[in-house]
Image (cartoon, rainbow, N blue to C red):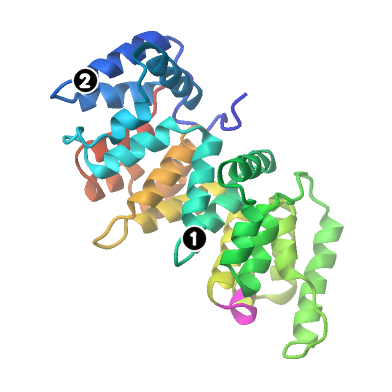
């Protein structure tokens, strides 16, 4: 069963799917001197991820070749680097792709905090537990240990529990609890600001409560104090921790809205963040990309398609647009 299937998807199962036929068509598209990127785009976006995995298996069975390696081959000179990266992402399972993205966010000299937080805040607990299993199997180190080694301070206190998939799974709201928590946040941070007195664990609250309960608590806090929760975060936290906590507040209100903002920022300025575009559009195409498109247009007064058209090019642009438009 796919952990990615929801009603807001742009990509769904192809009712006319035939893995053998598609494997043959892809072989013809990549074999020889010419590469037919239009055929590649059509097949990749007409099928769900589960169906792409079956195409990979049939391609290997029939031709004794790895389809991913075929796309990565230097012989594919007509295919741009970003297009190849997007194809590779589409050929990974959802869990494998997130595992790959998380490893990329913590390896090397610096941490990609925004990518790390984005994934940890927006995946279901079921999906996160599958990622943790896959991560340990692939890299022989746990996800939480990698994160603990690569982060520090309040930021580590936030992302480490998230990596252990301990967020409360209920969608119920306890209004009395929300009111009490809001009062506790206000009392402890107001009375003991600047002291060493133990205070309410706000970081723990943001990485353990379900989003509906978080939202109810935020609304109670704002009614009680007259200030926004973002104002509170900016007064009490700094740097990556403050940014991560504010992201959790955004997700409590709207995960599609959070992604719409991330996509907008990925296409701000001169340089486009291709990695962010690939990560978000691929990972949400079978979940809520339709909702993200709606949020994007409401917030920025232009369609996501229009933004992508003006900030990307060639095959990469056409493949992104096909995913955004969907296969319905």
Write down the residue under mark 2. Answer: 31
Image-quadrant location for residue 225: bottom right
| Residue 115 higher or lower than 64, as above or below | below
For marks 2 and 1 on the same chain, the one whose residue lies earlier in the sequence: 2
Q: Position of residue 299 (x, y in %)?
A: 42, 53
Q: Quadrant of the N terminus?
A: top right
Which residue is nearer to you in this view: 68 or 228? 68
| Quarter of the image with the C terminus in it | top left
Query: Residue 124 vs residue 138: left or right?
Result: right
Nearest the viewer among 81 and 118 is: 81
Label 1: few (<14), some or many (≥20) within 10 Å? some
Residue that sits furthest to the bottom in the current view: 194
**Secondary structure type for disc 1:** helix
Asked if residue 203 is positioned above or below residue 34 in the image, the reply reads below
The residue sitting at 65% across, 80% down in the picture is 236
At a point 35% along the width and 9% down the height, the residue shown is 21
Give the left or right position of residue 182, taking residue 65 as reference: right
Q: Main secondary structure of the magenta part?
A: helix
Q: Which mark is residue 90?
A: none
Residue 66 vertical placement versus 22 (above, below)? below
Q: Which residue is mark 1?
A: 114
Element carrying mark 2: loop
Image position of 37 (left or right of 88): left
Instruction: Indicate yes or no whether the magenta region holds residue 223.
Output: no
Vertical order, 109 against 140 (above or below): below
Specify the segment rendered in magenta: 233-238
Who's the residue at 34% across and 55% down the image? 273
In which quarter of the view is residue 221 placed? bottom right
Q: Is residue 63 visible?
A: yes
Badge 2: residue crowd in 10 Å (few <14, some 14–19, many ≥20): some
Q: Position of residue 116 (x, y in %)?
A: 53, 56
Coordinates of residue 56 in the picture (x, y in percent)? 42, 21
């Amino acid at each position: 069963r796919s952990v990615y299937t929801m009603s807001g998807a742009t990509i769904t199962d192809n009712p006319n799917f035939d893995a053998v036929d598609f494997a043959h068509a892809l072989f013809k598209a990549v074999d020889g001197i010419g590469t037919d990127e239009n055929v590649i785009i059509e097949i990749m976006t007409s099928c769900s991820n589960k169906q792409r995995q079956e195409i990979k298996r049939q391609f290997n069975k029939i031709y004794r070749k790895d389809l991913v390696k075929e796309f990565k081959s230097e012989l594919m000179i007509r295919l741009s680097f970003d297009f190849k990266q997007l194809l590779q992402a589409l050929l990974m399972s959802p869990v494998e792709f997130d595992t790959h993205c998380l490893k990329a966010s913590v390896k090397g000299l610096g941490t990609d905090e925004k990518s790390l937080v984005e994934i940890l805040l927006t995946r279901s607990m079921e999906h996160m537990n599958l990622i943790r299993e896959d991560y340990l199997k692939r890299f022989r180190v746990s996800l939480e240990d990698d994160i603990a080694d690569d982060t520090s301070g309040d930021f580590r206190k936030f992302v480490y529990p998230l990596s252990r998939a301990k967020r409360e799974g209920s969608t119920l709201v306890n209004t009395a609890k929300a009111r009490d928590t809001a009062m506790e946040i206000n009392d402890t941070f107001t009375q003991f600001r600047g002291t060493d007195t133990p205070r309410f664990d706000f970081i723990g609250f943001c990485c353990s409560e379900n989003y509906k309960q978080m939202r109810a608590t935020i609304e109670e806090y704002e009614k009680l104090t007259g200030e926004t929760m973002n104002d509170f975060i900016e007064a009490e936290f700094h740097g990556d921790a403050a940014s991560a906590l504010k992201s959790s507040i955004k997700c409590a209100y709207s995960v599609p809205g959070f992604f719409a903002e991330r996509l907008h920022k990925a296409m701000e300025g001169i340089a486009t963040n291709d990695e962010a575009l690939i990560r978000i559009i691929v990972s949400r195409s079978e979940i809520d990309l339709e909702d993200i498109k709606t949020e994007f247009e409401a917030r920025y007064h232009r369609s996501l398609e229009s933004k992508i058209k003006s900030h990307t090019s060639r095959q990469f642009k056409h493949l992104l647009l096909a995913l955004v438009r969907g296969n319905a």
